[in-house]
Amino acid sequence: MVKVILTESLAKKYTSGETQITIEANTIQKLFVNLNERYPGINKALNHEGISVVIDGEIFQDALYERLEGVSEICFIPRIGGG
């Protein structure tokens, strides 16, 4: 099982305010599919180019195929620009 922590704005729009969700997934891609089945439309927001994925405290910009081991904690955060 994976613990997903959503921002207030995502939670308000897609999950009726629920900011912490437990869901089954073994990759980020599968997590997106399962979240979208439960909360239609959320996949589009999470796949947005401006979102990074935090897996157990480590930030990934291209995390789609990252494996999730056991009980992972996933957060979605805006990407930080720079140059």
Image: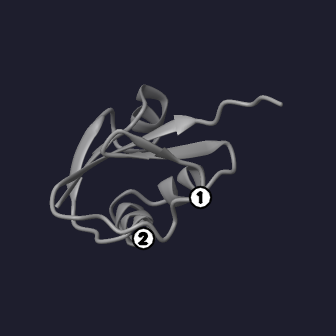
CA distance for labels 1 and 2: 16 Å
Percent from the top left, x then y, of residue 60?
A: 52, 50
Question: In the drawing, what numbered circle is on residue 62?
Answer: 1
Mark sitting earlier along the chain (1/2): 2
Percent from the top left, x then y, of residue 7?
A: 43, 31
User: Who's the residue at 37% across and 64% down the image?
Assistant: 31
Task: Report if the CB atoms under discs 1 and 2 are less than 8 Å apart.
Answer: no
User: Who's the residue at 54% across and 51% down the image?
Assistant: 46
- Type of residue at label 1? Asp
Local SS, label 2: helix
**Viewer-side residue, 21 vs 2:** 2
Q: If the image is split into quadrants, where does the C terminus sit? A: top right
Question: In the drawing, what numbered circle is on residue 83?
Answer: none
**Viewer-side residue, 59 vs 43:** 59
Q: Where is mark 2, residue-wise? A: 33
User: Who's the residue at 32% across and 32% down the image?
Assistant: 17
Residue 11 placement, left or right of 56: right
